[in-house]
Each structure stands twice: as C-alpha cells, then as structure tokens.
Image (cartoon, helix red, strand yellow):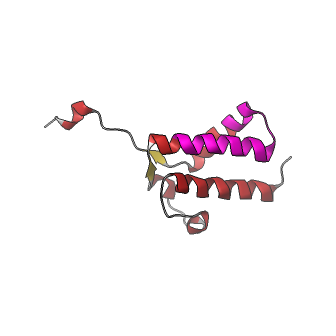
Amino acid sequence: MINPDKIQLIVKHLIDKMFECANLDVKYEDLLDRKDDWYAQYTMTQEQYETWRDYSIKYIKKEKKVPMKYAEREFAWFNLSYGLKVEQPKSPETDNIN
C-alpha cells in the first residue's frame, strides 16, 4: 500500500505538470481553496494532452512501482477527475455554415 502523503505528492506533481504542458501559469496551490469546476475553465490542445499523458503514465509507473497497464488505468481515473478539457479542432465544414 502506498503512503497517503506520497499519493498527495503525486497528485500535486501531475496537476502542476498538466498546467505546465498546457502553457498555463497555474499551480496546484492556486486551486487548493477552490470549490468550483476549475478543471473545466482551462483547456489544452490534443498535442499538449498527449505529452502530459505520456509523461504522467511513466511517472505513475515509476513512483507507484506498478505495471504499465495499471499506470494507464490510474492515469485514466486521474484525468477523469482532474484533467483539463481538450480543445477539439474545428472542422472546415463548420466554418462555412451560416
């Protein structure tokens, strides 16, 4: 079983890394007292998301000493809980609709 303090450090690190990958000047400490849906107020590109995802899975695997499949599943839950919205590219067809 992993120490709860270590889990909190992993959460903090991954949230800080998420904002870093999204080029946003926000830190975990900025969010501590917020009770709103802060995670829905920021976005990241698909490329930024993939960079963060790849980094996070490797980090979870290393820090929790778990197999890759487990780290991927942990990331999926983490992203569901804390992940930023990913910007959807506009399709060219919608640009011409009046």
Q: Position of residue 12 (x, y in %)?
A: 66, 58
Task: From the viewer's side, name the closer residue of 23 and 42.
Answer: 23
Is 46 displayed left or right of 51 in the figure? left
Figure check: 19 above or below 60: below
In this rendering, does residue 77 appear at all?
Answer: no
Q: Position of residue 77 (x, y in %)?
A: 63, 41
Give the residue displayed 29% in from the left and 33% down from the top: 91
Spot the residue most to the right: 1
Q: Position of residue 27 (x, y in %)?
A: 57, 64
Q: Is residue 60 magenta?
A: yes
Figure check: 79 above or below 20: above
Give the residue displayed 66% in from the left and 56% down from the top: 13
Q: Is residue 52 magenta?
A: yes
Give the residue displayed 51% in from the left and 43% down from the top: 49
The number of numbered badges drawn on the structure is 0
Viewport quadrant of the C terminus: top left
**Overall secondary structure of the magenta section:** helix
Give the residue displayed 78% in from the left and 33% down from the top: 67
Identify the magenta region.
50-72
